[in-house]
Structure formats: structure tokens, C-alpha cells
Image (cartoon, rainbow, N blue to C red):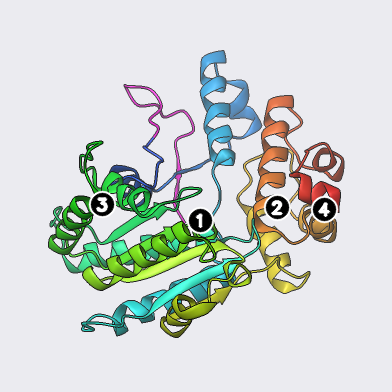
Amino acid sequence: MTPPHSPLALSADGPQEPERHLTTLSGWRAFVADQPVIPELLSDVELEKLTLAERTRYDEGRIDHHTRLLVVATSIVQQTVTCGRRLVLLNRHAVSARRGLIVSGPAGTGKTTAITQLGRSHELIDRARHPGLRDRIPVVYITVPPAATPRMVAVEFARFLGLPVRTRSNITDILQSVCGVLADARVGLILVDELHNISLATRSGAEVADTLKYFSERIPATFVYAGINVERQGLFDGTRGQQIARRFTLVPTAPLPYKSEWQGLAATLEDSLRLHNHKPGSLTHLDRYLHDRTGGMIGSLSHLIRGAALDAILTGTEEITERSLKAIPLDHSSDSD
């Protein structure tokens, strides 16, 4: 865990916000390098000594802490990282028919978190094996645009790499440029999110699938896909689907049941709180309510607790209670159950 830092520390240039667009190389590298500090809670005596400006900075540091999504090593994250690392090693000397991974399940069940944690793990390992080599690009992360065409997907790869794409550039030129750069940069893992935007039942969707297959044959890397219930949308149907089914391992995601893992997740999130009046254990005592309210969705749970923590700081109550949790509106799906 990252050690606490001085609650009043402020850089000369003011608060720094790293580039957060994972679909760019600079954004991805910032994500991998980011090590958020955990604010240290001051005592009541120390709080009374703060000037107005110092108290504002102190509260802003805690607010920023609670706006971040705490990454918890859930079973889905662990399974994805373990399986992904295994496939990367198995593919290390493969010259064709490389194996891949598909993470699929309902929205809000941690698919993107799982594959990005796999990517972060892979990149950190690659950096340790090849220290000081900044010309390497161990991981690529793209998302499939809605109503995607093969050219649009190729442009997403180029955009991640920062390669210029002219309006007149045809897909062949883009493919050659992207594949050449990635081969030279020794890419080892390619993450493709929002796979549900591809429908093999349509001509354009089938062509996008063929384009991704072309990338996988030209680039010596392990491909990892993530999408909403992709196995239910015909991804494994037909000739193309059968090829995907034979080459890819499926990691299904689902809402967490009300068992020990959910209870441990609630406890971990409570430990991350930086509130002055919050009583330890009061949130874990509400784990049944939290499960009923969120339907076991990790994303909804994180939103609920972080929102209540922000309200606790902004209102000065400095604690989370069942009443304050009920005041936080959730997504329509959770609040409709």
C-alpha cells in the first residue's frame, strides 16, 4: 500500500492531473506509473491549528483520494491476471495460432478493471526485464468504436501510438504502419475493450473481426478482449466464431454473491476511507444492505461508497451511515431492482 503523505503538501505548479486517456500511449504510461498517495488524517488538535487555506488543501486532498477508484484484487481480477500472464508465456515462442483471452459479462462487473490490471502487471514486468528501454511498447489498449469499421479499428491502433492518419490514408497503409511500429516496439499484450460493439451478424462486424484476426497474425502479441456478454451475441457462431472459440479462453464475470468475497470487499473499501468521524466496522455491518442496493455490482458499490464519502467531507459530517448511503442515487439498473 502506498504510504501516507503530508496532508498539506502542494507542488509549486499546483495539483497535477495525469493524462487519463488509456487509449493513448502517454495516457497508458501515466496509468501504469501512477501511484496515488494516501492522505494522513490529522488529529483534532492539528486541525484546529490549520489556516483556512491549509484546511482547504487538506480537504481537497481527501476529496481527491475518494474520487479515485480503489482497485481491489477480486477473484475476477486475479483470474484474469493469472490466465493472461500464462497465455503471454505460452505465446512467447509461437509463430502462429496464438492463444488469447476474452473477459465477458454484464456491465459493471469489473471487466475493464480486470484487463487493465493485467496490462499494468505485464508492463511493469516488462520494464523490470528491460530497464531503461523507453522505445519498447509492451501493452496497447484500444476500445472498439460503436458501428465500427475495419478502418476505424485500425485508426484506434494508430491513435494509441500517435501515428498520423490522413483522411486519404487507406486501411492497408494504416495496417502496415501500425504493424511495423508494434513489431519494432516488441509489443507483448494487446487489450481490446468494448468488444460487444462488433456483431458478426453484420458485414461490417465480420470485417472488423477479420481485421483483428489479421492484426493477431501480423503482431507477435497476446490479444485480450473484453465486452458485455459477447458470447450471447453470436461471437462464437459460424466459421469466424468457431475460430475465435478455439483460440480464446473465456473468463466470465458476474455480480458478486453475498458471501465472504463481498464482505471482504466492503471491508477493504472501508479501510480506504479518510473520514474523521467514521466508526470502523460500521460500513461492514451494512454489507447486506450494500449488496441488496447494488445487486452485487462492483462498479455500483464503488460509486455508492465514494459518493457517500465525498458528501461526508463536503457536509462536514465526516462519516458514512445507512442514511447517507440512501441519499446517493445509483445507476438506473441498480435503483430499479
In the rendered structure, which disc, 2 or 1, sits on the residue that comes first in sequence?
Answer: 1
Q: Which residue is mark 1?
A: 194
The residue closer to the viewer here, 56 or 192, is: 192
In the rendered structure, which disc, 4 or 3, sits on the residue that comes first in sequence?
Answer: 3
Q: Nearer the viewer, mark 4 or mark 3?
A: 3
Q: Is residue 140 left or right of residue 113?
A: left
| Magenta stretch: dominant secondary structure | loop
- Give residue 7's position: percent from left, percent from top: 49, 33
Q: Amino acid at mark 3?
A: Ile
Q: How many marks?
A: 4
Q: Is residue 7 magenta?
A: yes
Q: Is residue 294 left or right of residue 36?
A: right
Q: Which residue is mark 4?
A: 293
Q: How many angstroms separate mark 3 from mark 2 (CA)? A: 42 Å
- Give residue 192's position: percent from left, percent from top: 41, 60
Q: Which mark is residue 301?
A: 2
Q: Is residue 147 above or below residue 307?
A: below
Q: Amino acid at mark 1?
A: Glu
Q: Is residue 25 above or below residue 96?
A: above
Q: Which residues are magenta?
A: 1-17
Q: Is residue 52 above or below residue 329?
A: above
- Give residue 171's position: percent from left, percent from top: 26, 51
Q: Nearer the viewer, mark 3 or mark 2?
A: 3
In the rendered structure, which disc, 2 or 4, sits on the residue that comes first in sequence?
Answer: 4
Q: Amino acid at mark 4?
A: Arg
Q: Which residue is mark 3?
A: 171
Q: Residues within 10 Å of mark 4 (few under 14, many from 20)?
A: many
Q: How many angstroms separate mark 3 from mark 1 (CA)? A: 21 Å
Q: Is residue 148 left or right of residue 294?
A: left
Residue drawn at x 82%, y 38% as measured from the top left: 324
Q: How many angstroms separate mark 1 from mark 4 (CA)? A: 26 Å
In the rendered structure, which disc, 3 or 1, sits on the residue that comes first in sequence?
Answer: 3
